[in-house]
Amino acid sequence: QKEVEQNSGPLSVPEGAIASLNCTYSDRVSQSFFWYRQYSGKSPELIMSIYSNGDKEDGRFTAQLNKASQYVSLLIRDSQPSDSATYLCAVNWGFGNEKLTFGTGTRLTIIP
Amino acid sequence: EPEVTQTPSHQVTQMGQEVILRCVPISNHLYFYWYRQILGQKVEFLVSFYNNEISEKSEIFDDQFSVERPDGSNFTLKIRSTKLEDSAMYFCASTLDRYSYEQYFGPGTRLTVT
């Protein structure tokens, strides 16, 4: 059974600080990794994708992937109250298996 | 910016009734998906659909469920005889092709079975 694990939180971060969200996954040969943001009662919104080891930056967001450690993280710099949401880690296991497997999500609260 | 749309936003039905949830994927996307999220739980894959046939389905997607692309734009999920445990948010998603992997989600349909 392929699993995606996240700390459910809640994670509280002061406004302007860096929020760090972590995710581990069970299958070493996984191909693609995604971070989605989900506001309460809303649908998942894709914010980052990462496919190769290392860092990928997009604005205030940085995704980090370490396939050897089976670990992917999301850093949010200069956190804003509007970043308060649940962040979902999702994995595509690859090799023609197109579905996404989601973690339970980490609830992030930015404190003004 | 193109979006996935879903109707209705909320559906209330009685146990044993049939429901059809509708989705319009992003127009040039080729792969379509249904996921569900029971309140307080994780997003779960139900089914993927490509080239007018099911590509993969989960164990949740039993004989009570079916999917269809009745025309060039709509993608539907039918639940034949709803159960109380089918109450959840149902999300449609689409992706450009099997190699892009980035799936874009619609706003969801909240299904309440009473």
Image (cartoon, rainbow, N blue to C red):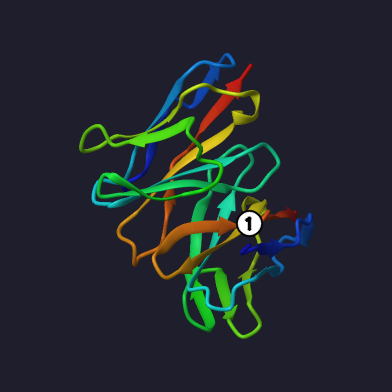
Compared with B61, B30 (above or below) is below
The chain holding disc 1 is A
The residue carrying pointer 1 sits among few (fewer than 14), some (14 to 19) or many (20 or more) residues within 10 Å by Cα, namely many
Image quadrant in which the N terminus of chain A is located: bottom right
Q: Which of A108 and A102 is in front in this view?
A: A102
Q: In this view, does B109 lie to the left or right of A87?
A: left
Q: Which of B8 and B37 is in front in this view?
A: B37
Outermost left residue:
B72
How far across and how far down the image is residue B53, in percent? 30, 46
Residue at 52% of width from left, 73% of height from top? A30
Q: Is residue B22 left or right of residue B11?
A: left
Q: Nearer the viewer, residue B56 or A54?
A: B56
Residue at 56% of width from left, 69% of height from top? A61
* Residue bearing the label numbered 1: A87
Residue at 36% of width from left, 44% of height from top? B3
How far across and how far down the image is residue A87, in percent? 63, 56
How far across and how far down the image is residue B105, in percent? 45, 47
Compared with B27, A67 (above or below) is below
Q: What residue type is labelled 1?
A: Tyr
Compared with A81, A63 (above or below) is below
Residue at 53% of width from left, 77% of height from top? A29
